Image (cartoon, helix red, strand yellow):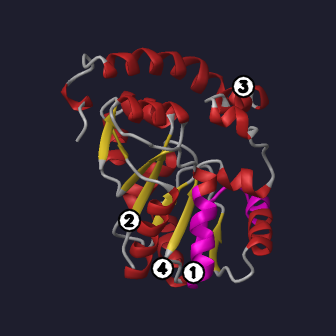
Amino acid sequence: MKSLVLETRVNTTSYTDATRQVEDWAFAGQSQYVCIANVHVIMEAHDSIDFRNAINSSDLVTPDGMPLVWMLRLKGVKGQTRVYGPILMLHVLEMAAREKIPVGFYGAKDQTLEKLIAHLGGLYPSLKVTYAFSPPFRPLEKQESAQIIKDITASGARILFVGLGCPKQEIWMAEHKGKIPAVMLGVGAAFDFLAGTKPQAPSWMQAVGLEWFFRFIHEPRRLARRYLYNNPRFLFLALADLLGILGKGNKEA
């Protein structure tokens, strides 16, 4: 089942259901992509119809942020829980290790990828990592993009974790659906969190929806606009959505 939050799709799902779906797609060798939505994603989608289409055209959208979980509950989705990107990533990796499904990583810095893979190797000794690449921050040339597609395909990875950050990773996955024979998951900062290169908010702050504040005080310059501009707008628009005055698209579908 799916609902619309500010006209952007968010699925009713759980760690177990999402992991099982990724497993089925991976075994079938299907090219699909999973978006992990928080307030930032929803507001980017609100501001850009092209980005909203990229989210709404995905194969699964999980409620990563607690505000989205609360929105779904208020829209009548009983018992909805958070499906947080870094934790979902661990669930999928555990499954991939158990089922011998090759995985790959696209994004972050070289040092982060090295630490990430080393850490995951300790957690899941049987995990098969067949691809890892840190792309440049600049736009890629056509030939470079073609080579990346070729390399990922040749690696045999059936699950590809994409850590480019929002909105870049969602757009990249949408553009590469049908070109890469893998399930792509846009996991944002999960690479850094699991590699230990960035701190994660304490569980109690995550539970009460204050993870944004923890991240803001650690990276105020980079995240100021995201949180100080987007969060108040989201509160206003979410209220309009719940009152049914945002527009026709905010009804549950």
Is 5 situated left or right of 158 in this image? left
**Is residue 96 a member of the stretch shown in magenta?**
yes
- Of badges 3 and 1, the one in the foreground is 1
Between 129 and 175, the residue placed more toward the observer is 129
| Sequence-first tag of 4 and 2 | 2
Whether the residues at callouts 2 and 3 have beta carbons within 8 Å, the answer is no
Secondary structure of the residue carrying numbered label 4: helix
Prevailing SS of the magenta stretch:
helix
Whether the residues at callouts 4 and 2 have beta carbons within 8 Å, the answer is no
Cα–Cα span, label 3 and label 1:
37 Å
For the residue marked with disc 4, what is the amino acid?
Answer: Thr
| Sequence-first tag of 3 and 1 | 1
Label 4 Cα crowd, 10 Å radius (few <14 / some 14-19 / many 20+): some
**Is residue 107 a member of the stretch shown in magenta?**
yes
For the residue marked with disc 1, what is the amino acid?
Answer: Pro
Between 56 and 112, the residue placed more toward the observer is 56
Task: Indicate the position of residue 123 as horizontal and vertical percent values.
Answer: 76, 71
What mark, if any, has residue 102 been given in the picture? 1
Cα–Cα span, label 3 and label 4:
38 Å
Label 3 Cα crowd, 10 Å radius (few <14 / some 14-19 / many 20+): few
What mark, if any, has residue 153 been given in the picture? 4
- Determine which residue is flagged by label 3: 221
